[in-house]
Amino acid sequence: MSEPIRVIQYGLGAIGRAAARLALSRPGIEVVGAIDRDPTLAGRDLGEVLSLDRKLGVAVTDKPVILFAQTRADVVIHCTTSSFVEAYEQLTEIVRAGLHCVTSCEEALFPYYRHKLLAGKLDDLCIQKSAAVVGTGVNPGLVMDTLALLLTMACQSIEAVRVLRVVDAGTRREALQRKVGAALSEEEFKARSEQRKVGHVGLAESLAFLADGLGWAVDELKESLDPVIASKAIKTEFLSVAEGGVAGVRQFARGLRGGKEVLTLELQMYVGAPNPRDVIEIVGEPPLRLVIEGGVPGDVATPAILVNTLSRLVECRPGLHTMRTLGLPRMAL
């Protein structure tokens, strides 16, 4: 029997904790370390932090470099930030320790779009240290990019790809509801959007990933972000949206070639959104349309994707990967 994959969990927010719990349930995985920058968690047993009924003998630390040096591990599950720039130093510390890493950082899905220089430097370091890094999740990572690209495998020709994701944010965790601007006024939403402090991160990266996978040189990539205004008062477990207040967002990323829109990604994520679903349409030969009723549930599926990527990550060649170059992940016990 092969040895289990030895994992360090880096970041113990909602997604990080869910990933750690799932990893602990898999017989082929051993959780050997945990990191969080919150000093109140330092020194506490991971089992206690995860609200388990047992101690694990794994103490949470806020000193990652020391943990990497003192712990025999294979891979890190990294869940700390949406920004590739903010994650960069953490990722380089992981790679310098010779560890593989799967990160939920949204911009890391395709960091070459906004941060080509940093991405190249990290790729070089990965090769030097024989480590592999990939960014993934539900969105970005699966629904609006990888799954759409995979579906094109059945086509002889393609004219356009369109993806729609509708999410009722009222069923999701508090952090996501606030990230999409629920309960803000229109004025507050506008101010925060100008500071890039509201809205989904990674939609442009999903489009750039798709274009790269299809071999399409996109002439122009356009993004738009608008508030969805509540037509009635709505109350969730975490907040209240007044009638006329912001319930969430409607975002677009559009890719143009020769003046024609060939890639269209639309995200509707707001409290009370009706008929949640994921829809992928391929305009081509043959035309294809895939609908996932209810949509892929991010709070459950993102931890699953992170954990299910581990076995593929430790097998692949060194480098900074995308979901296209990594190879097909799968659920494996």
Image (spheres, rainbow, N blue to C red):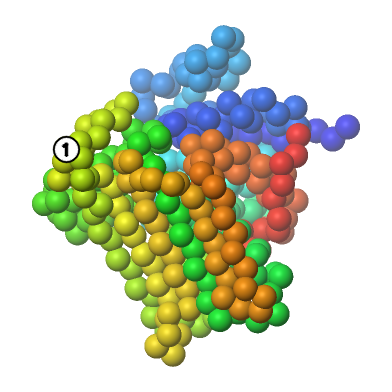
**Looking at numbered disc 1 in the image, what kind of residue is underneath it?**
Ala
Q: Quadrant of residue 265?
A: bottom left
Tell me, yes or no, if residue 244 can be seen here.
Answer: yes
Percent from the top left, x then y, of residue 324?
Answer: 64, 63
Look at the picture and state if 260 lies above or below 329: below
Q: Position of 25 compared to 60: left or right?
A: right
Q: Nearer the viewer, residue 14 or 36?
A: 14
Q: Residue furthest bottom?
A: 258
Circle 1 residue: 242
Looking at the image, residue 73 lies above or below residue 201:
above
Res 57 → quadrant: top right
Q: Left or right of 186: which side holds 292?
A: right
Looking at the picture, does residue 57 appear above or below residue 325? above
What residue sits 61% from the left and 78% below the top? 284
Return the residue nearer the eye: 210 or 239: 239
Which quarter of the figure is the C terminus placed in?
Answer: top right
Q: Locate the N terminus by quadrant.
A: top right
Do we see residue 66 in this rendering? no
Residue 3: percent from left, percent from top: 80, 33
Residue at left 28%, top 61%?
225
Q: Residue at x 63, y 30 (%)?
A: 23
Q: Residue furthest right?
A: 1
Q: Helix, strand, or loop for circle 1?
A: loop
| Residue at image coords 36%, 64% | 252
Q: Position of residue 43 (x, y in %)?
A: 46, 18
Q: Residue furthest left?
A: 187
